[in-house]
Amino acid sequence: MNGAQIILEMLKLYEVKHVFGLPGETTIDLYDHWWEYPEIEYILTRDEKNSAFMAEAYSKVTGKPGVIDSPSPGVTHPAPGIAEAFAGSIPLIFFTSDVYPNDDKRNMLTGIDQTGFYSSICKESFILDRPEEIPFLMRRAFRVATSGRPGPVHLRMMWNCLSDKADVTDLYAQSECCVYPSYRTIADPSSLEKALETLLKAERPLIICGQGALSSGASLAVQQFAEALCIPVATTTTGKGSIAETHPLSIGVIGARGGTEFTNSFIENADTLFYIGSNTDSTGTDSWNLPKASDDKIILHLDVAAENLGNIYKTSVSMCGDARASLEYMIRLISENKIERKSDISDLAAERERARKQLFDLPVPEINRGIFPPRFSKILDEILPENVIIATEPGVGSICTTPLFQMKRPGRRYLTNYALGALGYAIPAALGAAYGDENAPIVALTGDGSFGFNCGELETLVRTGKNITIVLYRNDTFGWIRGETVLVNESKPFCTDFSKKVDYLGVAEAFGLHCQRLTSHNDISKVVSKAIEHDGPSFIEMEVVSQDMIAPFVPKWVRSARKKNIPSIY
């Protein structure tokens, strides 16, 4: 077998169904054999950056490592998606092709030190230069990507390796590494027991789930643990869905990217915080002000990555282990020992719904143009089915939908890229999600700023025919930058505004999408329903104001807006 055949055979053994990529001349030897593997679908994209975001979202939805293929001419393009997966602990198998070994030293076209380029944003980077080593290295790649703190692994396919032949006798996969986490480690039992004792003594404990709880598949364990001890549950933006947000003990999202005055007050009032699968990053803690390091709070921290434990806050109990396995151990302790915790809190639903209704029913400020985002989020919350998958990115679409749209079932069905936060995520993420769950309607919430990064993928949507609805929030500016500049720096926006002449609907129509413009609050339900019911991709454009005009759900913006008598939503 040649190297190309060995790679494809190993992908088949690892039950890979989809690969996202863009063909290149240094990989043609691989494609010559791809016809022999119809069970591995190659999804042609229009930009390697988008391939990486698609694979990252696919991995989130399926619980399997996403697979990417990038040729040497565009080898630097996937970097934003690879970096997002690395920072967000999402497993990817990242193939690149390369020219002959050492040809980069001869200044061969497309030749660069790919290993050096990607080593800092991948867990490991391998060079495939001998076909007989491919099975060993691919087993290692899947094992490394899916174990411990998950993440991307880079496989650099040298041109000669794809056509060179070898007799291989070790064509087999480690089946446990077809999914993640492949190996679950329980935290030290004595630490888990100490944490349980601490929670039993707490008067106002709060559980905060980050995306590690979702990666671990710990939603049921989180719910059972919270119910056993009657403890409210909050999530970070990236942890949204760790528990159904309609559950009596769920309060919703906290922090600086979707936290509300209601939800963030639980952090301020808590005496004990139990972080599960969280890296206590700036967005989940409002730049480490929720809580402050100086606050007199007891901190318990469970995470699979030891480097996250106690990284920001002085931690009373640090537990290094898989979230689901460790919580299940604690649940067994509670059951076997018939442990009960006295609490006045058993159902937060009424209080939570009052807070949401106040936000939904905010009067539309006079300064508003077009659609008021809370009104749009309210209709989404009412009409979208439980199995919907929403892809968002930094911007007004995310910041208003995150706190106001409820995930009515647990699981990772609200996709954001708040590990790093690059623009241009929602549309490719929606495509990746559509392949991850082919029965779910997909909604991508994007802005006109982000749309400029990936409008070429509209062709991919039309070609694949996926049921994806794109909602374009149009404010003709990089609104987030305006918000930060005006409300925090108190200065004049610099180079943020776009031409108002752009016909986004015309662009989408030219690609072949079903298009609508939303101009009235009374039409939201009709327009969105029509888009969801359309058999194929749809595009909705709606005008909104920029974030400096109505400050949304970012505590420091809201504080500034209130001082300046600028409308805010919080």
Image: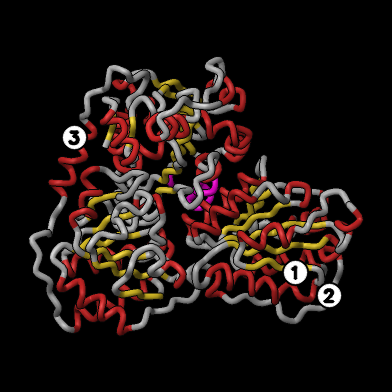
Contact between labelled residues 3 and 1, with CB atoms less than 8 Å apart: no
Type of amino acid under label 3:
Gln
Quadrant location of the N terminus?
bottom right
Compared with residue 570, is residue 436 higher up or lower down, i.e. above or below? below
Left or right position of 334 against 449: left
Q: Which residues are magenta?
A: 431-440
Residue sitting at 33 percent across and 46 percent down?
386
Quarter of the image for the C terminus: give it: top left
Drawn side of residue 118 relative to residue 289, left or right: right
Q: Amino acid at mark 2?
A: Ala
Q: Residue at x 52, y 34 (%)?
A: 537
Circle 2 — which element?
Answer: loop
- Left or right, 454 with respect to 567, comes to right
Task: State the image coordinates of residue 341 (x, y, percent, origin top left).
Answer: 12, 71
Main SS class of the magenta portion in the image: helix
Q: Position of residue 319 (x, y in %)?
A: 36, 75
The extreme top residue here reads: 501
Tally of numbered tags: 3
Residue 126, magenta (yes or no): no
Q: Which residue is mark 3?
A: 358
Q: Amino acid at mark 1?
A: Ile
User: Where is mark 1, residue-wise?
Assistant: 6
Where residue 400 is drawn, which disc sits there? Answer: none
Q: Which mark is residue 166?
A: 2
**What's the residue at 40%, 48% (across, down)?**
414
Q: Residue at x 63, y 46 (%)?
A: 49
